[in-house]
Image (tube, rainbow, N blue to C red):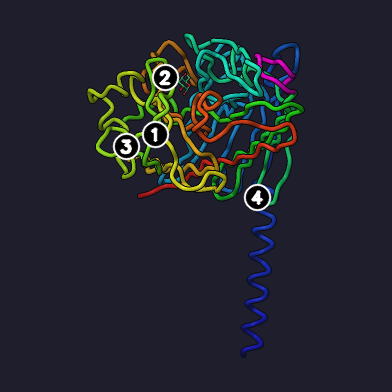
Amino acid sequence: MILKSTVALLFLSGTLFLLCGAGRKNSASVKREDFGKADGQNVELYTLTNRNGVEAKITSYGGTVVSLKVPDRNGKLDDVVLGYDTLDGYLKGTSYFGALIGRYGNRIAGGRFKLNGVEYKLATNNGANHLHGGNKGFDKVVWKAKPIETANGAALELRYLSRDGEEGYPGNLSVLVTYTLTDQNELKIDYSATSDKDTVVNLTHHSYFNLAGQGNGNVLKHELTISGDRFTPVDPGLIPVGELRSVKGTPFDFTQPIAIGARIGQSDEQLKIGNGYDHNWVLNGNSGTLRQAAKVFEPTTGRVMEVWTTEPGMQFYTGNFLDGSQIGKGGKPYQFRYGFCLETQHYPDSPNKPDFPTTLLRKSGNYRTTTVYKFSTLR
Ligand code: GLA
C-alpha cells in the first residue's frame, strides 16, 4: 500500500516536473524584429515573454521598454507603460519614455563638476543645468543587443561604449544593462559599468507607468507607498539644496499608502517648484542591498507594482510636463499626469554635493546596481 502510493506520488511529481519543464521551455521566449534605423544603424525590437504570458517589448534604441503587458485582477493583460508605436516617435521624443538614462540620470547643476582637480563641462540641456546625460544621452543611442536565456527567465543584454569626452564626461565607459523578465512577473534590470578613467555614473530607467493601462487617464488615484523618511528639497531649477528633509507632516510623506493625487494640489513650496512631484527620495535601509523602495496599487484594476532597488535614492515624477501634445501608442494623447516615474538612482547633483553618497566610478572600479519592478494583483 505504502509502496503503491509512493510510486503514484513519484509518477505524479515526475509528470508535473515534465509539464512545468515543457511549459517553461515553450513559453519563456524572446522574439526579434526590425524596428527601423537610427544613426545609420539597424534598430531591433525584442519581445520577452514569461510563462504567465507577461510580455515586455524592448528596443535596442535607447534600451527602451516600448510596452509592458501585465495582468489585472481578472487576468486581463494591458500595457502599463507610456510610449510610441514606432521608432520615429522615440527619435523625436523628448520625454524619455521607457528609456535607459545615462551617463548621469537626473540633473547636474550648471552642467559642471570637478573631478581630481579638473573641471568638466557638460551640455546644459535643461535651463542652466545638465539633465539625463545631455543632448544625446544613453536614451538616444543604439545599444548592441543580445537575447539570452537565464535560470530566472528570458533576458536581453544591452551593451554600449560611451567614448571618452562624450557629452563632456571623462573616460571610455563600457556599460552593460540586462533586462530579465522572470516567471515571478518581475522586470529586473541589472546595470554594470567600468571606465578607463575616473568618472561619474548614475544610470536609471525612465518608464512612465499607468497601471490602469497606458493612455487610460491620469495616475492620481494610484495609491503609493515609498520607503523613504526623507527627501531632497530642490531650488527652482530642481537642483537639491543639499538638505535631507524629513517627509513627516508634508505632502511628501508616502510612508503609508496614499493616493498620488491626495495632496498634489496643496499649496506647498516644493510641490509648486515641481508643478507636482518631481523629487528624489532618500530611500530607507542600506544602499547596495536590494530592498523595497515603493509599492503602487491601482484600485480599478487591482494591479500592484513594487519597486526594489540597491540604489540610495528614487526620483518620483508625476508626468507634470505632459500636456496632451504627444500622441502615444494606439493614438492616445498623453495628457497632464498620465504617467508616473519611479527612477531609482543616486541623488541629483551628487558630483557637486560631497555629502551625498558618491557617484564616482574609479578607473579600476566596478559600477553595479539592480532594480526590480514586480507586478501582482490585489482583489
Ligand atoms: C525626470 C525629471 C523631470 C523631467 C523628466 C522628463 O523625471 O526629473 O523633471 O525632466 O525626467 O521629462
Residue 71 relative to residue 236: left or right: right
Q: Which residue is mark 4?
A: 152
Q: Residue at x 70, y 30 (%)?
A: 175
Residue 34 appears at what percent x and percent y? 71, 22
Residue 334 relative to residue 200: left or right: left
Q: Nearer the viewer, residue 252 or 155?
A: 252
How crowded is the residue under tag 4: few (<14 C-alpha within 10 Å), some, or many (20+)? some
Q: Amino acid at mark 4?
A: Asn
Q: Amino acid at mark 3?
A: Val
Q: Is residue 149 magenta?
A: no
Q: Please tell me whether mark 3 sits on a helix, a strand or a loop.
A: loop
CA gap between label 4 and label 1 equals 37 Å
Of all residues shown, which one is farthest toward the bottom? 1
Residue 109 appears at what percent x and percent y? 50, 17
Query: The magenta stretch spans which residues?
Result: 160-171
Q: Is mark 4 within 8 Å of ligand 1?
A: no
Residue 203 appears at what percent x and percent y? 59, 30
Q: Which residue is mark 1?
A: 244
Q: Which residue is mark 3?
A: 247
Q: Please tell me whether mark 4 sits on a helix, a strand or a loop.
A: loop
